[in-house]
Image: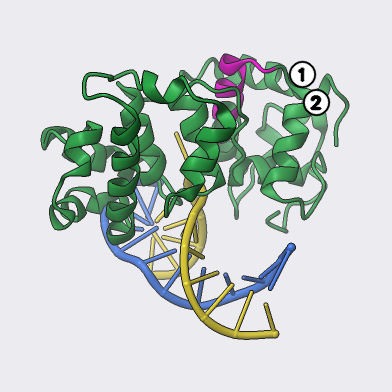
Chain colours: A green, B yellow, C blue
Amino acid sequence: MVAKGQLLTIYSELRRAFGHQHWWPARTPFEVIVGAVLTQNTNWRNVEKAIRNLEEAGLLSARALGQADPRRLQRLIRPAGYYRQKAGRLLGVARWVALHCAPEDEGLCGLKARSTDELRRGLLSLSGIGPETADSILLYALAKPVFVVDAYTVRVMGRHGLIEPGGSYADVQQEFHDRLPQDVELLKDYHAQLVELGKRYCKKRYPDCARCPLYPLLGPPLIVEADL
DNA sequence: TGCCAGGCCGGGT
DNA sequence: ACCCGGCATGGC
């Protein structure tokens, strides 16, 4: 892995190139949670349509969503794909939120008051909430200092040999936790920057590394073909 | 036109 | 403990 200051240097370069990303794009913490489930292996543009549908249906609150008819839910979120699976996942997470937060608690203070570890275990116990979705919710909805690892993170860092090949989610996350300050705003924007970088220059099939803002810093990627 | 997108689960080695 | 197929829509 990289030296301690290297991750911050990488962030500075990305930030300079792309500007602050202002993630997560949502009006309420609960909308973040909904988006985190809907965006699983799915283009964000499709997710926006689904969220819009839920908003028009008045289902962007934990209680309303948790009591929604599953078939209706499926129809509303269809643009986001995997809609039969995701409808059930949304019901589950919505009921979990409603269980811990009062109806008027739009800021989800009832959840934020709990410890990160307890929240993470609770989220992972829900069906359809894996490590990345759980950490996205912890960081962007509940403001917990957690680094979110996603496919772009692994691909970008992996191609430059900056993480151990074959490392697990927990391994990669640990590297970042060891080398970054526990600063929620930094962690939020760092992940957002890596996604932006990935979308522009580190696609699976057509990487455009020479124009990547990290190129002057890191040079050409060591590995391009393998999707680490 | 295919390939891909801000994963996760369950069954098989 | 990994590895893999399935899940589904819309955009480029």
Which mark's residue is nearer the viewer, 1 or 2? 1
Label 1, label 2: how far apart the Cα atoms are: 9 Å
| Quadrant (top left, top right, bottom left, bottom right) of the N terminus of chain A | top right
Q: Is residue A92 magenta?
A: no
Q: In which quadrant of the rendered image does the C terminus of chain A lie?
A: bottom right
Main secondary structure type of the part rendered in magenta: helix
Callout 1: 10 Å neighbours few (<14), some, many (20+)? few
Quarter residue A183 falls in? top right
Is A52 in front, or is C1?
C1
Q: Which comes sooner in the sequence, label 1 or label 2?
A: 1
Contact, mark 1 vs mark 2 (Cβ under 8 Å) = yes
Identity of the residue drawn at 56% across and 15% down: A185
Highlighted magenta segment, given as a residue range: A182-192
* As drawn, A116 above or below A171: above
Q: Is residue A190 a member of the stretch shown in magenta? A: yes
Res A23 visible: no
Secondary structure of the residue carrying tag 1 is helix
Is A70 placed left or right of B4 in the picture? left
A159 or A187, nearer to the observer: A187
- The residue to which callout 2 is attached is A217
* Residue A9, numbered circle: 1
* Chain identifier of the residue bearing label 1 in the image: A
Asked if badges 1 and 2 are on one and the same chain, I answer: yes
Residue at 50% over, 34% down: A119
Determine the residue positioned at 68% across, 56% down. A227
Q: Chain of mark 2?
A: A
Identify residue type, mark 2: Leu
